[in-house]
């Protein structure tokens, strides 16, 4: 990521009351029953913190990281408003290193950097859960995205060797002009 990326995301968050909405991802909510609700969690590219706050509400000690000061500031304000505690860091994910064997839960929604895949896998503790969702190649027909910003078919399912896939889906919704893959996986 670059200063240009940081400026882009700050401007997007600044020009919207809430870019991705306040509600946590449906995929995360639907799979909350698989989560222990305790331990350490990491939310990669947390944005304005909708999923970070949900994990904190479940009882996780959540650490969120994002490049946007505006997004992180909004997440922190929402946490205070909802009497939740989160920890956050403004960081360029191109240079971010995930601590090994540190997290019981790792979340990543609508951010793709394949260089982080190995760090995500290693960052989970045994028994830790990964919940990941982002755009697939079918999304290119609805967006101006570059191909490297989207997953190939079944790529997410195969991206984390050594993790047991608990649930997986690929969705293409022409009526909503979106296409994405969703994964829940656990480290044995």
Image (cartoon, helix red, strand yellow):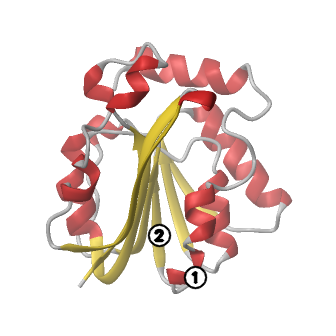
**Is residue 183 at all visible to an observer of this figure?**
no
Local packing at callout 1 (Cα closer than 10 Å; few below 14, some 14-19, many 20+) is few
Q: Residue furthest right?
A: 81
Q: Quadrant of the N terminus?
A: top left
Residue for point 58% across, 82% down: 33
User: In the rendering, at what x and y percent does residue 79 appear?
Assistant: 74, 59
Local packing at callout 2 (Cα closer than 10 Å; few below 14, some 14-19, many 20+) is many
Is residue 25 positioned above or below 19 on the image?
below
The CA span between labels 2 and 1 is 16 Å
What is the number of the mark on residue 48? none
**Image side of residue 96 versus residue 75, left or right:** left
Residue for point 38% across, 29% down: 138
| Camera-side residue of 88 and 39 | 39
Q: Quadrant of the C terminus?
A: bottom left
Q: Quadrant of residue 48?
A: top right
Instruction: Name the element at disc 1.
Output: helix
User: In the rendering, at what x and y percent does residue 147 appear?
Assistant: 27, 22
Q: Residue furthest left?
A: 161
Instruction: Name the element at disc 2.
Output: strand
Q: Which residue, given by chain and number where applicable, does mark 1 sit on?
A: 33
Residue for point 26% across, 57% down: 157
Residue for point 19% across, 57% down: 158
| Camera-side residue of 99 and 111 | 111
User: In the rendering, at what x and y percent does residue 155 appear?
Assistant: 23, 47
Is residue 107 positioned above or below 61 on the image?
above
Q: Which residue, given by chain and number where applicable, does mark 2 sit on?
A: 41
**Image side of residue 55 versus residue 148, left or right:** right
């Amino acid at each position: 990521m670059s200063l240009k990326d940081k400026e882009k995301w700050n401007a997007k968050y600044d020009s919207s009351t809430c870019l991705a909405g306040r509600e946590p991802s449906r995929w995360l909510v639907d799979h909350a029953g698989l989560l222990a609700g305790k331990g350490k969690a990491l939310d990669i590219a947390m944005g304005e913190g909708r999923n970070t706050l949900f994990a904190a509400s479940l009882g996780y000690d959540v650490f969120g990281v994002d490049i946007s000061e505006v997004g992180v500031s909004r997440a922190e304000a929402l946490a205070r408003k909802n009497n939740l505690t989160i920890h956050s860091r403004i960081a360029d994910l191109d240079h971010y290193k995930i601590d090994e064997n540190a997290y019981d839960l790792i979340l990543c929604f609508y951010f793709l950097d394949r260089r982080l895949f190995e760090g995500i896998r290693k960052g989970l503790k045994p028994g830790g859960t990964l919940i990941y969702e982002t755009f697939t190649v079918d999304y290119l027909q609805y967006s101006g995205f570059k191909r490297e910003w989207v997953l190939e078919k079944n790529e997410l399912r195969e991206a984390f060797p050594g993790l047991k896939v608990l649930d997986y889906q690929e969705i293409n919704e022409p009526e909503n002009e979106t296409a994405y893959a969703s994964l829940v996986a656990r480290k044995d």
